[in-house]
Amino acid sequence: MRYLLSEHLSKILSECADAVRLLMRHRRAWEGRLWFQPLRLTPCLRIQGASVAFRKLFPRYAITVLIIFSGHCFASSPEEISYLGPGRSEKADLYRPTDSHPRPWPAVVLIHGGGWFSGDKADARERRIAETLTGAGYVVLSINYRLCRKPEEASAWPQSLLDGRKAIEWLRSHASEYGVDAERLALVGSSAGGHLALMLTLAGTDGEEDASGGIRCAVALYPPTNMTDWKDIRAWKITRKENPDIYGKASPTRYLAKQSPPLLLIHGDADTVVPLAQSEAFAKEARAKGASCDLIVVPGGAHGFALQPKGTDLRPAVLDFLRTHLQPRSR
């Protein structure tokens, strides 16, 4: 065992040395690029001894080298997946944890925000959330889905919801291939993605109460929850006045029930895009119906933060919630 560890460490150090030589060779061409600047040391905090050693040897490039090194310890680059099949350009990024976490792994479908007309699976917020989750031992499928970016394009609703269901089905059908425990699935989404996460957990795909499709729990950051009491959605290409039934059926609050899967809502009290009142009313309705729903209010939080808004670290609360509700079930 000691020999295998030593051999693996030697391989990693050799690759780091190669990386340093590459950086030195091309430093003049790369120094102006954003990714070459000093980066976050968060992945390196657990290997402080290596940090000191590399800083002494390569003080200018230590951070970059450590990020390459830490990739062996935490998570690999995502694999792009065509989860919607032929004829659709939207893809998903599949992140996997390292084998230091025991298989089969629980999994999370991550759904970006953007008002159903913008946003991407590889946005900085989504990447940071995915890195947090993979670092804790979760497979993450970060998806793109139907958007309506231009007036001439088709409505984003309800196809965005159907795409979310396809993502869940894809992950479940490929579970053994990617080391996923198909019975331990959760959803995480922000803004419009938080709305989709709640709808997929509570109402399925057809706007009827067809349950969650096996989703154990969901985390929604600053989601709209009552679409009839918010605003007209440009990307849906219809107003509340023209068709109030569509907005009513697209409201997660409508589907709350005592047997609903556990939910965690996170919302800033300075959000001017989706008012905090949306999450507060949802949590109140959940309590009235006996559903499990926690609400974390972020002081001073505006719209669009990830899991580390200024002055607050939400990662422990989110990871504890997922850990609690994605435990393996006894057989």
Image (cartoon, rainbow, N blue to C red):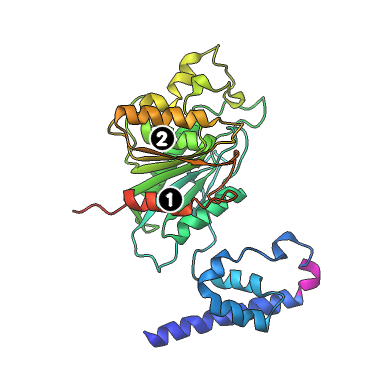
Q: Please, what secondary structure does the residue beneath circle 1 have? A: helix
Q: Which quadrant, please, contains the N terminus?
A: bottom left
- Disc 1 versus disc 2: nearer the observer: 1
Q: Position of residue 44 (x, y in %)?
A: 55, 70
Q: Residues within 10 Å of mark 2 (few under 14, many from 20)?
A: many
Mark 2: secondary structure: helix
- 159 vs 310, nearest the viewer: 310
The answer for how far apart the CA atoms under marks 1 and 2 are is 22 Å
Residue at the outermost top position: 242
Q: Which mark is residue 317?
A: 1
- In the rendering, at what x and y percent does residue 292 appear? 33, 37
Answer whether residue 27 is magenta in the image. Answer: yes
Q: Residue visible at 53% across and 34% down? A: 192
State whether residue 203 is above or below residue 104: above
Residue in front for this viewpoint, 83 or 275: 275
**Residue count near mark 1 (Cα–Cα under 10 Å), binned few <14, some 14–19, many ≥20:** few
Q: Residue at x 62, y 80 (%)?
A: 54
Q: Which amino acid, mark 2?
A: Leu
Depicted 227 relative to depicted 19: above or below:
above
Q: Position of residue 172 (x, y in %)?
A: 36, 47
Q: Quadrant of residue 197?
A: top left
Q: Is residue 174 visible?
A: no
> From which residue to which does the magenta span run?
26-30
Vertical relation: 213 (above or below) 99 = above
Name the residue type under label 1. Answer: Ala
Residue at 36% across, 47% down: 185
Query: Can residue 305 be found in the magenta stretch?
Result: no
Say the numbered circle drawn on residue 200.
2
Which numbered disc flags the more N-terminal residue, 1 or 2?
Answer: 2
